[in-house]
Amino acid sequence: MIDKDAPTGVFLPAKWQLINTSVINYVNPGTRITWQQPRFEYKKPNTIPNEMIIANLFDTNNQPVDLGTIPLTNQPQNIYQSSFSTLDPVNFVMDLSAFSAGKYRMDIVESSGTTSQRFYLFDPMINPDLYGVSEFFVAAPLAAFRFITEDPVSHRWILDTMPKKFQIRFRNRLTRWQYLKQDQTIFDQPPTPRPLTKIYSGYNIPGPGGSTIHLPDPAVNTIIPDVKATTRLVKNIFSKIFLNK
């Protein structure tokens, strides 16, 4: 997804180097991160009754963040004690609404070990149209890197005097096509994902006697995501095309 790279010397946007055009990085499953709303929940069976569970929050720079107290109380909200009864599951709930949007790591410390969860915190009520988040890294800058600066007189945030320019590429949408018979067995499946198009893309396969079979493109309403149950992330997106007899 990154098209330009900052050189290792003095940081000046005018001196940026264009990466070799053959190197194109798009968003992939390895770059995904869970989106977390302000209500953080940690649930599990109560295997160790009366266990003390500690939560530690860290920001994107791995600096600890004080989770504060439970709203309307003076009790720290990063400490949870499980029930004496194994019938009552662990339901560790924390309010993160006081923290700004950004990437965090939550470490849940139990007697069995530490469970780490990385997420991007955001409030959909404040950012209802948020589409995605991009991170930018600069190698060895001599001065602090920032997009905006605070005017010392008006205390308003303004764009830096030398605005940084980035080019973000979005790859054309692709799906995995499956041509299904009426009994839903697969008649044909292209080996690689194919584009979503508004017009016929010309997909065909060899037929009997040296003929060519022209197969239709999928309709938009046949797009079916394949979601992994444990992470709720989309593994693949299929376009299923049912063929008549």
Image: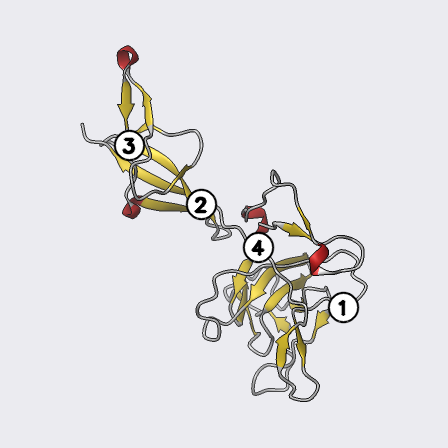
Residue lying at 65% horizontally and 80% vertically, measured from the top left: 68
Q: Are marks 2 and 3 in contact (CB under 8 Å)?
A: no
Secondary structure beneath label 3? strand
- Point out residue 139 in the picture as x, y percentages from the top left corner: 76, 55
Identify the disc placed on residue 180: 3
Secondary structure beneath label 2? loop
The image quarter in which residue 11 lies: bottom right
- Nearer the observer, disc 4 or disc 3? 4
Kindly identify the amino acid type of the residue bearing the numbered disc 3. Leu
Secondary structure beneath label 4? loop
Residue lying at 50% horizontally and 64% vertically, measured from the top left: 87
Q: Earlier in the sequence, mark 4 or mark 2?
A: 4
Identify the disc placed on residue 167: 4
Task: Name the residue tied to disc 1.
Answer: 144
Is 33 on the left-hand or right-hand side of 236?
A: right
* Nearer-the-camera pick, 136 or 11: 11
Bin the neighbour count of mark 3 within 10 Å (Cα to Cα): few under 14, some 14-19, many 20 and up.
Answer: some
Task: Name the residue tied to disc 2.
Answer: 172
- Point out residue 69 in the picture as x, y percentages from the top left corner: 63, 81
Bin the neighbour count of mark 4 within 10 Å (Cα to Cα): few under 14, some 14-19, many 20 and up.
Answer: few
In whole angstroms, how far apart are the C-alphas of marks 4 and 2?
16 Å
